[in-house]
Image (cartoon, rainbow, N blue to C red):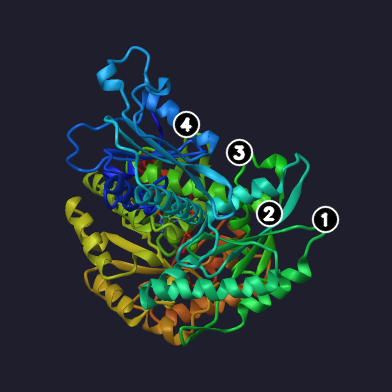
Amino acid sequence: MDTPQGSLAGSRPGAGVADEPHALPGFDAVARLAATRLDTPLVALLLADGSAFWYTPPGTSDPIRLDGALLAACRQAMRRGLAEVVPDARDDPRFVSAGTEPAHAAVGFFACEPVFALDGQLLGALFAADRHPHPPPHTGELGALRDAAALAGTGVALRHYLERTDPATGLPHRNAFFADLHAQLPGERDSAWLVAIEVAPVARFHAFIRAMGHTYADALMRAVAARVHDWAGPGMQLYQVGASRLAVLLGGPQGELPSARLDALVARLREPIDCLGVPLTLQPGVGLLRVEARELRGGDPLRRVMSASHAAQDSVPGWAVYDHAQDERQRQEFFLVTELAAALSERTELELHYQPRVQLASGRCVALEALARWRHPTLGAVPPGVFVPLAEQAGLMRSLTDWVLDHGLAQLAAWLRNGLDVKLSLNVSSADLDATLEARLGAAARRHAVPLARLELEFTEGTAIHHSDATRCHLAALRAAGVGIAIDDFGIGYSNLDALRQMPASCLKIDQSLVRGLDTSRHDAAIVRSMVALGRELGFRVVMEGVETAGVLAAVRDMACDEVQGFHIAHPLRAAEVAGWLHRHAAAAPADRPRD
Ligand code: C2E
Ligand code: MG
Ligand code: MG
């Protein structure tokens, strides 16, 4: 190709380094000075790395382009590395392009000055050219070209620095890290320990920035970097590989885990730090990965070691070696979260199943619990025990609950229209427990013309108890509107009796793990018996979950609980199976139904 690559830095005043990685700091000013002093319509800089920059003064009526014979001649002169001035270049064969109009192709004036790095290495050359010949330049003009070339050399050094360095901390950044990593592992069998330091959990680091500003966050990173520097010792290069992340490459023989050194690093990082007068204790995570040269192609060692440092933040030692299985699990979780988000927007893979709940005294089905089911096209059935907690972590819970509300209430409305006398119980999570819940539920009920008294919400014990007075008010408002409130999975949390007494709940569902062994474990039976008594004493209806066998049902019957749910009564059913099950159940001989 006969045109120079690189940016037309000089013709775009203000073009910055940040948005144009190839821009050369200061080139505009340098080129303008040279063009003015030598009175030429073109000043150009060619660098040995192949990049080119050129400048044409604004308003130039007869511009001269850096291409064709001129570009070839500049390249040749750059390689020679010598200063050169050609006042009348019209007869010089270097400047005649084959096949071009002589009047347009002609270069009348040409001057070249080599550009050197601070260590004397030849970097490229600066050129001034005009279509018309010039009188031989005087010493001042030549001196100006020389100065401009020296300044261009400084700009190249600055660009190199900026390309490698984070301006806030002065540390080499990710690009430099990868360049150095490849340089440190030249042979196929070479390897090194890579240490990554996550300074604080991401949410906490963002909270620092929100509360104290970026200047504080930068100062914090500098303070942490100073500690890591002390720890790594002289000659060890430290990199800033993310806003709150540092990395170091350690030499050291294969197989030898520098565990004592990592303990020392974590201990140092956990010491209180004084940043701009604000005392702070960090929660660092240090990850360790043995990087093999042959894995560098295509692999991303930084991502892998960061997964270790991330995991280490919550661990007791505060450091962790990269664990492939754990990494795969996290990637799988991430994959599931993105797939769940897609499933929630497309709404074809999700379904609700309904598990009947039966009143012990009458044998009547009093409610159906809606349970979400997700059938992924390639992974198959993903259990709610997996995707519900993921939805909670990934902020998808509200979408999931809205989907459940909409779908469940539409189904309930259809059953009510068909004359079935049922209520619907819906599981909601802690993320749903706020001022919007009443409005969301109310809107869904209105949309599907379902009375609120036909609905019940189930919260797990932990969610229900650990919430604030405000939550209690929202729940009380729902209760007052006729919605039932059930405390789910009761008996495995840490509720104190006072908190329980104050819950505006109507129903207590005893966790299936306690119910399962009722007929065989006297110990479990004693616990559940006292829970039932307590629940009834506090005015709750008591439900036993997970009644799997006739033996457990018989044991439950002795305890004066109100309702039962479990595989012995019915598994969760598809919507289409519910009406049939209800009819069969109502028609069944009383002996086959739970007796009173
Ligand atoms: P949960 O609300 O306590 O629901 C009861 C779970 O126990 C259901 O599991 C049900 O299939 C299972 N189960 C019922 N009877 C028996 C039995 O006799 N033996 C055994 N071993 N298990 C029984 P599932 O459907 O896998 O749901 C698990 C949990 O996931 C639910 O526990 C609930 O906390 C959550 N979940 C399910 N669907 C939703 C939803 O739509 N929203 C929310 N927030 N959570 C949901
Ligand atoms: Mg439930
Ligand atoms: Mg439960």
Q: Is residue 251 left or right of residue 12?
A: right
Q: What whole-number distance in Å separates the C-alpha atoms at marks 4 and 2?
A: 52 Å
Residue at which label 3 appears: 298
The amino acid marked with disc number 3 is: Gly
The amino acid marked with disc number 2 is: Asp
Above or below for 61 versus 354: above
The answer as to whether callout 1 falls within 8 Å of ligand 1 is: no
Residue at which label 4 appears: 75
Going from N to C along the chain, the mark reached first, 3 or 1, is: 1
The amino acid marked with disc number 4 is: Arg
Say which element carries label 1.
Answer: loop
Residue at which label 2 appears: 323
Going from N to C along the chain, the mark reached first, 3 or 2, is: 3
Camera-side mark, 3 or 2: 3
Q: What whole-number distance in Å separates the C-alpha atoms at marks 4 and 3?
A: 35 Å
Camera-side mark, 3 or 1: 1
- Identify the mark at residue 355; answer none if there is no mark: none
